[in-house]
Image: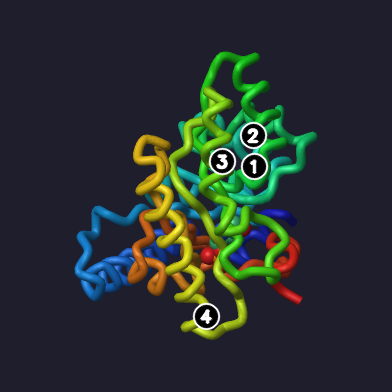
Amino acid sequence: MIDQQMHSRFGHHPEQLFRDNLELVEQRIAAACARAGRSRSSVTLLPVTKTVPSAMLRHAAHAGITVMAENKIQEGHQKSLDLGDLGIKWTVVGHLQTNKVEKMIEFASEFQALDSLRLAQLINAELVSVGRSLDVYVQVNTSDEESKYGIGPDQVIDFVKELSRFPALKPRGLMTLAILNGNPEDVRSCFRRLRAVRDALTAAHPYCGIEKLSMGMTSDFEIAIEEGADIVRIGQAIFGKRPTKDGHFWPGLLP
Ligand SMILES: *Cc1c(COP(=O)(O)O)cnc(C)c1O
């Protein structure tokens, strides 16, 4: 029954489907890089696997996917167990509740939604107790009041300065979700804003570790690449349209 439901969403040859979708995404990334005068190798594709069942992700791994990003801890944790034999690297891209820190540390090697010092402190303490570190990205709210999560662009420099108190956190970059109003120029200005914040940050704190911009998803990754994205987080263009409404994953960004 479950298998039938999966096959109606993914077809009878999911591995080939994922291969074909990846190829199309790859072509679009390459074209955007060419337009922006960037080398293809300057952009990393981060596949976002939320709502895609583990059995289907096994096919995706066979199609060449080695890194998977999840928005919700419970779902990501379960999949990491289901796919434990595949050596997948897991990233968490969604807002983290403080009571989920321990569970995240069990499977994630990267966290892209750091948005409070309280959370930084809790994650650091947990990491210290298990003797490891974690790559982190600071989530920035580039769409003003539209989004519930993320540090305000004006607060990022002070926030990052405070992060040096938490040695198990390895700051790597900034992450944002652009406004989802469908207006490409508004979207572009969110991405420009993130880039400006990063540039100001590296001028103020050249050794803070933050270099990369994680921005752009299925609906806007080409604009993000034109505006300097280092990492694009793409789900639906690879795995097909999600049955779940996006407001569930991006509180405040959608009605
Ligand atoms: C789901 C999600 C994505 C990918 O969105 P798609 O529309 O599937 O490409 C990117 N970033 C975050 C934080 C997400 O939750």
Q: Which residue is mark 4?
A: 186
Cβ of mark 2 under 8 A from ligand 1: no
Q: In the image, residue 39 lies at what x, y percent?
A: 20, 60
Asked if marks 3 and 1 touch (Cβ < 8 Å), the reply is: no
Q: Which residue is mark 1?
A: 76
Q: Nearer the viewer, mark 3 or mark 1?
A: 3
Q: Earlier in the sequence, mark 3 or mark 2?
A: 3
Tell me if residue 12 comes above or below residue 182 in the rendering: above
Q: Which residue type carries mark 4?
A: Asp
Q: Which mark is residue 111?
A: 3
Q: Which mark is residue 120?
A: 2
Residue at 49% from the left image edge and 35% from the top image edge: 135
Gap in angstroms between the C-alphas marked 4 and 3? 26 Å
- Name the one closer to the observer, 111 or 57: 111
Q: Nearer the viewer, mark 1 or mark 2?
A: 2
Q: In the image, residue 189 lies at what x, y percent?
A: 47, 75
Asked if marks 3 and 2 touch (Cβ < 8 Å), the reply is: no
Q: Nearer the viewer, mark 4 or mark 3?
A: 4
Q: Which residue type carries mark 3?
A: Phe
Q: Earlier in the sequence, mark 1 or mark 2?
A: 1
| Residue count near mark 1 (Cα–Cα under 10 Å), binned few <14, some 14–19, many ≥20 | many
Q: In the image, residue 20 lies at what x, y percent?
A: 38, 66
